[in-house]
Amino acid sequence: PKNIGILAVEIYFPKRYVEQTELEKFDGVSSGKYTIGLGQTRMGVCDDREDINSIALTVVQNLVEKYKISYKDIGRLEVGTETIIDKSKAVKTVLMQLFTESGNTDVMGIDTTNACYGGTAALFNAVHWVESSWWDGRYALVVAGDIAVYASGPARPTGGAGCIALLIGPNAPIVLESGLCGTHMEHAWDFYKPDLSSEFPVVDGHVSNSFYLKSLDTCYNRYIEKLVTKDKSAKPNLGSFDYVLFHVPYCKLVQKAFARLHFNDFVRNPDDQKFQSVSHFKGINIEESLVSKDLEKAFVNLSKGEYTKNVLPALFIATQNGNMYTASLYGSLASLLGEVPSEQLVGKRIGLFSYGSGLAATFFSMKIVDSISTIAKNLDIKNRFDSRVKISPEQFNEIMRLRDESHSKKDFSPVGDKSPVSGSFFEGTYYLTRIDDKWRRSYQRT
Ligand code: ACO
């Protein structure tokens, strides 16, 4: 099979959101901290009627309906998530309910977990299957999703929720570039979820940012080495990419990450004309470069124009909805497909950086080889975002309290924050109706 990659994309995000400017006031932090400091505009919110199963059910059923695919034609289904509600039973097995009517139970793949990296691992599993002698000619489906919630405090405004489904197969318009990837994995305690009685992670935000940027350095340089080995005429720098997408813990970190890639190009070729304004950083020690605010500012300034053109179009969903953990990088892809006209995207190379705390990280690339206008039309990003409903910070707090209270409960029917189903969910959304006395969960669809 040739041109293995993404044939279809569907995204689910909550209908309700909280405004970050209102959250700044409510939390009593200085005005601009969340919006300018973190680069976040709004945050999507799920009440106790949504869980990882419901958002995954929603995105898969919506993709299958929009693209008129038969469940019989799916031979592999991989799920990446870090939203764990069961230590044994995979979300994948819950999704098999959707296959019942088709009679197809011959579906390989299961869940994969490591923080925000699980979706990328799932994607590689799916692509490798299609490329292998094990492939049986059917589609693979990758599902990546999370409900990202933090304890009250500085990390809380960087939450969000969402789920992505990517249909994988040959002759795709968005092709994964085979063998081009730089990976870095290491043992780190930057963000983890050891307390199963709580939905919240243990996180040291500043430490995780630093691991994110250090991993980016390593992965990007490994990628560039592979690129120039494979293609002698390739540029060993950002000139090889038309767009760069990142895992988005919050948008401001992505701007710094893109600036950091310029710094890496500068280290490789400090005498390049492009770097005249930052030439005084020549020879700086790498450890020092990671903590120097002057350097960070200088490279953010240097890369501003390219950032606006080559990165910002991919941040629409992230700034409007917040972090979606495993789905975050692929939300950036969905944003790019929705924001840039198809004819401008054909022929373009996209660099992608996936980061999952703990940690696992990869820089890889895709090429858009054919029109993506059907995908953009089906995603319908702008209209769907326009039809969301705002809730107040007080309601948001109440929802967080409800989620906390209902976590790992049994013999229980979630009630949400008393808002009716119609105001809480988009049409076609699955939601949790009951957890019985044996913790078995039931869902309904709007
Ligand atoms: N106007 C404009 N900017 C402001 C304002 C203001 N009023 N107030 C603060 N800022 C700026 C700060 O200068 C700072 O900028 P800088 O990052 O360029 O230095 C930024 O806003 C954030 O302010 P801090 O004081 O650093 O914020 P705090 O320490 O309270 O929290 C943090 C930020 C650590 C990122 C927190 O939100 C967090 O822990 N988030 C989750 C961690 C995370 O996402 N990690 C990433 C990888 S792992 C993953 O994806 C889960």
Image (cartoon, grey):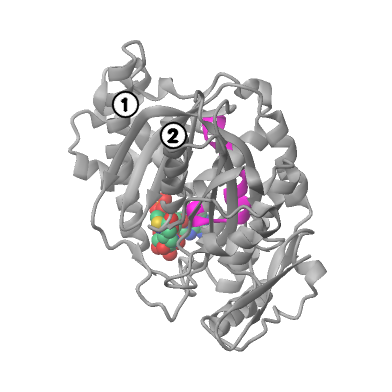
Dot 2 falls on a residue whose secondary structure is helix
The residues colored magenta run 308-326
Which residue is found at the position 50% from the left and 33% from the top?
307
Discs 2/1, front: 1
Quarter assignment of residue 404: bottom right
| Residue 131 image point, x, y percent | 44, 32
Q: Give the amino acid at mark 1.
A: Ile
| Residue 410 image point, x, y percent | 57, 86
Which residue is found at the position 49% from the left and 72% from the top?
85
| Residue 15 image point, x, y percent | 72, 61
Dot 1 falls on a residue whose secondary structure is helix
Does the rendering let one see residue 24?
no
Label 1 belongs to which residue? 224
- Dot 2 and dot 1 residues touching (CB under 8 Å): no
Quarter assignment of residue 239: top left
Which residue is found at the position 57% from the left and 38% from the top?
138
Vertical placement of residue 377 versus 268, above or below: below
Does the rendering let one see residue 142?
yes
Q: Quadrant of ligand 1?
A: bottom left
Quadrant position of the C terminus in the picture: bottom right
| Residue 320 image point, x, y percent | 63, 52
For residue 156, side relative to residue 421 (left or right): left
User: Considering depth in this image, is 420 or 217 the residue closer to the camera?
Assistant: 420
Q: Which mark is residue 202?
A: none
First in sequence: mark 2 or mark 1? 1
Q: Give the amino acid at mark 2.
A: Asn
Report, in whole angstroms, how far the alpha carbon at label 2 lies from the one at label 1.
23 Å
Label 2 belongs to which residue? 301
Quarter assignment of residue 61: bottom right
Task: Determine crowd level at label 2: few under 14, some 14-19, many 20+ residues with C-alpha closer than 10 A.
Answer: some
Magenta residues: mostly which secondary structure?
helix
